Amino acid sequence: MTNTLNVNTQYPSPEHPAGKSFRHRGFKISTRKLPILKAGPIEEMTSKLGITPPEMIFGDNMVSVEHEQTGWGINFNAFDALDRVDKTGQARLKVAYSTEWQKNREKVHEGIKEVVKPFDWSFTTDYKGTTTLRPGAAAPAFEPTDKPIPLELLRRPDPILFFDEIVLYEDELADNGIAMLSCKIRVMPARLLLLSRFFMRLDDVIFRLRDTRLYVDFDTKEVTREYVAKEEEFETVRTRLAATREDVPALMRDSNKMAEVLPIVDKTLERVMLR
């Protein structure tokens, strides 16, 4: 499900400078990279989200793509991504690390009033972006499609007109792995590709990958969104990588390598036409 921008949500904060902006073929692409949030904003975000935050939250970071004629846009930010984390406790990893993780949170966020309730402490999110719409504009919506993102076109050595990469949040899971949500965007003369990736490695337990790709064809004004979820047990991956005779620990820290190894557990493909 795609989040819809809540006008009361102040993440990313509108008070901060706009960061980098690039206009091309009727689209405005914007990115912003700022330091991690301080104690006050973290406490406010914690209260709004209802869950304990990750170690590092870049709450004012964002990537956005806006079609200026129709007023349709989509952005990726930490608050809305964390709002998609399971808060019922049903998806929580019930392993020995959870107690250690909770103790570590008490130290990291000492002095901040915690919201103590069960949730997925790996911060796994199925976030696909937050759609936005200019007031008064019609609301084009994503619909299912069978037309895949044209990888052969993306492999062309086209010039890169704009590129940026940002981190939205990160947590080391009590020194037992990593959970990170990041975004990369590159703009070429005829197309745009944005990758939002959640990567999680919990040592001796599991690997998870949640990729959202946004592809824009500037000629047709067609926007394609692909969501792919991958995961596998830690030992299964380690055994598979051991056969390669490569540096296994290094491979397990590389989300690109893990994307090649992990099996798909869920996938959706949607598109929206901007006229």
Image: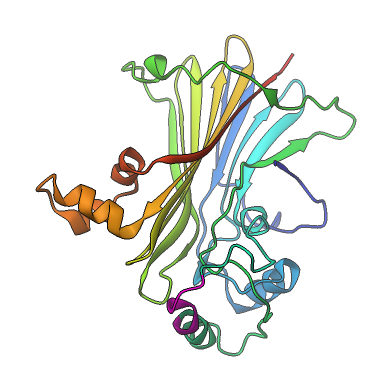
Q: Is residue 141 magenta?
A: no
Q: Nearer the viewer, residue 139 or 187?
A: 139
Image point 39% across, 63% down: which residue?
A: 178
Tell me the quarter of the image containing the C terminus: top right
Q: Is residue 179 above or below residue 271?
A: below
The answer to whether residue 239 of the structure is visible from this angle is yes
- Residue 264 percent across, percent down from the top left: 45, 39
The image quarter in which residue 271 lies: top right
Tell me the quarter of the image containing the N terminus: top right
Image point 24% across, 55% down: which residue?
A: 238
Q: Nearer the viewer, residue 73 or 260?
A: 260
Number of marks in the rendered image = 0
- Residue 61 percent across, percent down from the top left: 56, 53
- Residue 187 percent across, percent down from the top left: 47, 26
Q: Is residue 204 above or below residue 1?
A: below
- Residue 107 percent across, percent down from the top left: 49, 88
Image point 32% across, 67% down: which residue?
A: 204
Residue with the most extreme top position: 219
Q: Is residue 72 left or right of residue 149?
A: right
The answer to whether residue 253 of the structure is visible from this angle is no
Q: Is residue 141 left or right of residue 161?
A: right
| Extent of the magenta region | 94-100
Image point 36% across, 72% down: which residue?
A: 176
Residue with the most extreme left position: 245
The image quarter in which residue 136 lies: top right
